[in-house]
Image: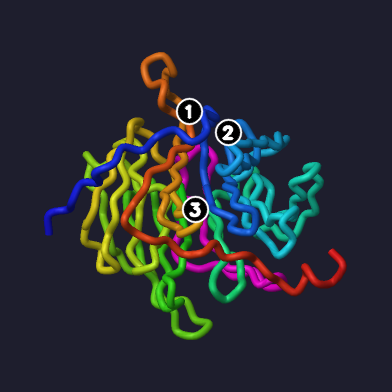
Amino acid sequence: MTPTVHPHTPRVTVACGCALGEEVLWDERDGSLLWVDIENPAVWRHWPERNESLRLPLDEKIGFAVPTPDPDRVVAGFQTGVALLRLSDGARTPLVRPDEHRAGDRLNSGNAGPDGRLYFGTMDDAEEEATGSFFRWDGTRLERFGGRAAVTNGPVLSPDGTRLYTIDTAQGIVRVHDLDGDRIGEPQPLIRFDEGSGKPDGLTLDAEGHLWICHYGAGRITRFTPDGEPEHILPMPTALVTKCAFGGPDLSTLYITTCLRGRNPTIDPMAGHLYQVETEFRGLPTRRLDLPLFHEGN
């Protein structure tokens, strides 16, 4: 299969200059985008309809922010663990921390699954040692699955909830786990990035169950079939592409975070910004994390 090349060029949505922009998502409740800057810690929000942006600075690295039923509260992955974060003032309440979490580790990517639980990964903040793991949390029980990795990305579940995708970024491998009820199967290699393809970073799934994976260091996003075949390529105007998600009223606009870390802004002025591009594809609605603890006065 020869991949098609996307006909439109992504344009800057917010010139945010994030040191390490990540984990963008669309909140249809108020038509807003939400993403994080890991290295210059902050949560960003943007309302495209009124072209308004807000930045909430934080005092600790943040890897993800997942919506909850309360629009003012997200479940966030910090360097020290998972916490409930209030967007209006930055107040946070610790929730859970992996037992083996080292001082040099941090939380990276996280998502709500169709089962209402939180799926997330940890990683070595220096991106050297394979100390990272993947976890599933139901508000009470924290379960580790898959193997170790220096840099984890995902985990993301398929639309029908039968497959779970994880990424070992440092090794350049995308893996798939079969889901049988509550049981997460062993990871099986699905896609391997060669040396000229950069590293697989953030991923999202569209309504057809295809994977959109960002090439960190190679300036593009590839749409893969569920079987791992490259089907569509979206070139980007900057090299360090980190995460993408569908948004907009009909979920056909792809929003993309990028990274300024390690780039010279004079040579690469497009690095670190949030981008958007129209597509012929449709995404999935953003899942919200709805755990019992949110209904117990917390």
Amino acid beneath label 1: Arg
Tag shown at residue 261: 1
First in residue order: circle 2 vs circle 1: 2
Q: Which image quadrant: the C terminus?
A: bottom right
Q: Closest to the observer: 129 or 10?
A: 10
* Residue at (46% x, 57% y) in the render: 154
Q: Which residue is mark 3?
A: 248
Q: Position of residue 284 (x, y in %)?
A: 46, 64
Look at discs 3 and 2 and give the one toward the viewer: 3
Query: Separation of disc 2 and disc 1 at Cα?
Result: 8 Å
CB under 8 Å between discs 2 and 1:
yes
Query: Separation of disc 3 and disc 1 at Cα?
Result: 28 Å
**Among the 4 quarters of the image, the one containing residue 88:** top right
Extent of the magenta region:
123-148
238 falls in the magenta region: no
Amino acid beneath label 3: Gly
Classify mark 2: residues with Cα within 10 Å, few (<14), some (14-19) or many (20+).
Answer: some
CB under 8 Å between discs 3 and 2:
no
Q: Position of residue 55 (x, y in %)?
A: 67, 35
- Secondary structure category for the residue under label 3: loop
Q: Please, is residue 121 above or below residue 13 in the view? A: below
Tag shown at residue 39: 2
- Secondary structure category for the residue under label 2: loop
Amino acid beneath label 2: Glu
Q: Farthest residue to the left: give it.
A: 1
Q: Please, is residue 222 above or below residue 140 in the view? A: above
* Residue at (38% x, 43% y) in the render: 277
Asked if residue 19 can be seen in this view, the reply is no
